[in-house]
Every structure is written in structure tokens, then in C-alpha cells.
Image (cartoon, grey):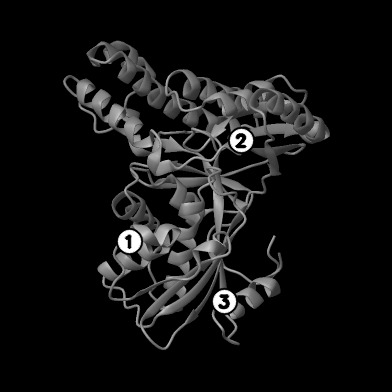
Amino acid sequence: MNLSALITEFQTIYNTTDKPRIFFGPGRINLIGEHTDYNGGHVFPAAISFGTYALVRKRGDNKLRFYSMNFPNDGVKECTLDVTEYNKSDGWANFPKGMIFYFQKMGCEINSGLDILYYGNIPNGAGLSSSASVEMVTGILLNELFHLQLDRIKIVQIGQKVENEYIGVNSGIMDQFAIMMGKKDHAIHLHTETLTYHYAPIQLSDHSIIIINTNKQRALADSKYNERQAECKAALTDLQTELNVDHLAQITPEKFEQYKHLIKDSVHVKRAKHVIYENDRTKKALISLQEGNLVQFGQLINESHISLQNDYEVTGLELDTIVHTAWDQQGIIGSRMTGAGFGGCAIAIVANDYVESFKTNVNQKYVATVGYEATFYTAKIDHGAREILGEVK
């Protein structure tokens, strides 16, 4: 879809001839470092070229109107600047509303209402962070439209607050950070406890990153995500009886093996093991990329999936079928689930010469096992949230 079509849609929905300003918030993939972000660990995400477009104009009153081309049956959601609290009936619109709510709480002067149209080409429920994409594109448009001059990391933190407190999902900060701070052809090696980060070039030469959508819908707030976080907290509490640590990710694999007997519940031992070893893998992954050792990087990705399957137990039939089949294909460097799990997407690094046969073979096995098709996308690593001109990809 091109920009002129989006502009026409905006003008039709809001019955105006005004030309809107256009902003874009990408989605994200996480190369490695899964379920470490709410445990004070390292993650390795990248912004991608799929994402959410937001077309916006200021109004002459204090009315806020939201419309999503992805949920056309929901119609236009409305509220006013003085009533931006969470309202379950507003559905998806609570994500942009939450951003406005916390901007106001910070004392930011949002002195006019807005008409906003959203269009996302991230598959709904795919686990590529469509909600964080909506949050960050809303944050960047508020910052620009009202000349608020907020630091980008402050907007990231507001987005996490929307997820945690406004929506009620105990997620970490990785998604918002990757989407706001993304850099073309680079991944972000981020320490979620301190928010220290640096960019690592993604030089895949003759390989591509393939995103494979299971097409199994997953609702994060209703999943076992919060349960996993509680299990990690319980494991940490047990370890703190003898270890002076604030987060699981502060513990090395060696120290974990020495002290894991302190964890009372055998399931909690597995959860802690995943987090601690995954954090270690993520550090090693950075070194592998810096040294240009793609084979070692792929091995770490594979080990990540095994841990997510066996120790964290967040994969399931769909993701395991895709990943285990991917491992058997020619040209594969590595494959694993990405995102929270329980459906969503996997990623694979595949030699360009084998991409088409890879898709055919993996999909064939997936249909035979699951009963419906997977969808394949080639990921382009792109810049973070921004105002845009040009064509919609």
C-alpha cells in the first residue's frame, strides 16, 4: 500500500481535506536473549522494515479519535484529553491512549485533540511486537507534534509503563527499546538492567534472516507470560538466601550450578537455568558477530531454542515443528523461536541460494503436522521510530 492510499483513507475516515503528518514505528525481532529482559539480562534485538504507520492531524478541540485499518470493524474510538484512563471497551486503542495518559502525567503539554489513523503490516498476534510498535509510533508523533523534546529512552520507558501498569502485562523493556532505538543493518546489544547498549553490525553476506509466522494467534496478556515472570521471581528469592543479587541474570552459569539446590521448586530451577544460560549465550553471540563467526552465532541460536523448549517451556507444537524442520534443511545457519512464545514467530538464518527450497520444505512439513500453512517473510533490519516520507513498504 502506498502513502497516497493511506492519506486518502485518513481523509475519508475523518471527513477532511487536511494532509496528515506520517510517522512509522517498526516491529522487532530478537536474535537471541529471550525472556531475559525482565530478569535484568542482555538481549539482542533489531528493528525491522515491517511496522505501524500513524497518520495524524491536530484538532481544534480536546477530542482524541483513533482508527485502525487493521480493525476496521471497531470503527473510530473516541475519548477526550481529560479522560484518557484505561477502558476495556476501547480494545487496541488503549495502547495509544496509554501513551497519551502517561505523557500527560509527566506534565507534557498536549494542548489539542488529535485524529490518528493506524495501519500496521505486522501480522496481528505474530509476536513481532505490534503493540510496542503502536506505542512507540504514538510516542514519537506526540514528541514531534507538540515539540516536547523528550529523550528517546524516556519514551521507551513510558511505553513499558503502558504495558506493565496500564494494560497489565509484565513485559520487559526490550520491545520498546528496539523499536525506538533501531538502526539500519544493526542489532542492539542491550543490558536491560542498566539500559547500556551498543550497536552491532549485522553482516550476513550471503545469508538472509527469514521470519516464519506460525499463524497461531497468541494473546500475550492471556498467555503464561506473567506466570513465567512469577516463577523467575520465586527462583530469585530462593537464591537470594545466600547470593547477593538483584536479578537472575547477575548469576553466572557456574555460580548457578553451585547454588541451584537453594531453589525449592524443580520447575523454578528450570526457569532460572534458562534465564542464566540464555544471558550467557547472548554475550557470546555478540562476540561471535564481532568476529564474523556466523556458524558459532547459529549454534547459539539453536541452543537458545532448545532451552526455551525444555527449560522455559514456551514453544509448543507449532514453533517446534518449524524450528526442528529448519535445522534439517540445506543452507541453515541457525533457527529458533523469537518473542514471548506460545505461537508467534520463529527466525532462521539461511543461505540465499537455499531460501526458496527452505520455505517449501519447512512449510510442507508444517502443513502435514499442524494442518495449516506458515507464512514466510524476509527481514530487513531498519531504522527506529520516525517521521517518514516516501512509499509504504
Q: Quadrant of residue 299?
A: top right
- Which dot marks residue 188? none
Looking at the rendered structure, the kind of residue marked 2 is: Thr
Up-down: is 151 above or below 48? below
Q: Quadrant of residue 223?
A: top left
Q: Name the residue under label 1.
A: 87
Mark nearest the camera among 2 and 1 is 1
Q: Name the residue under label 3.
A: 13
* Residue at (24% x, 29% y) in the render: 245
Looking at the rendered structure, the kind of residue marked 1 is: Asn
Q: Marks 3 and 2, Cα distance to the nearest angstrom?
A: 33 Å
- Which dot marks residue 214? 2
Is 125 displayed left or right of 255 in the figure? right
Instruction: For residue 354, say whether it is visible.
Output: yes
Is 193 displayed left or right of 301 in the figure? left
> Which sits earlier in the primary sequence, circle 2 or circle 1?
1
Instruction: For residue 243, say whether it is visible.
Output: no
* Residue at (44% x, 74% y) in the render: 65
- Give x and y (percent) for residue 226: 33, 36
Tag 3–tag 1 contact (CB < 8 Å): no
- Give x and y (percent) for residue 381: 63, 49
Regarding mark 3 in the picture, which secondary structure is present there?
helix
**Which residue is at the front of the view, 113 or 386?**
113
Q: In which quarter of the image is residue 146?
A: bottom left
How crowded pointer 2 is (Cα within 10 Å; few <14, some 14-19, many 20+) is rated as many
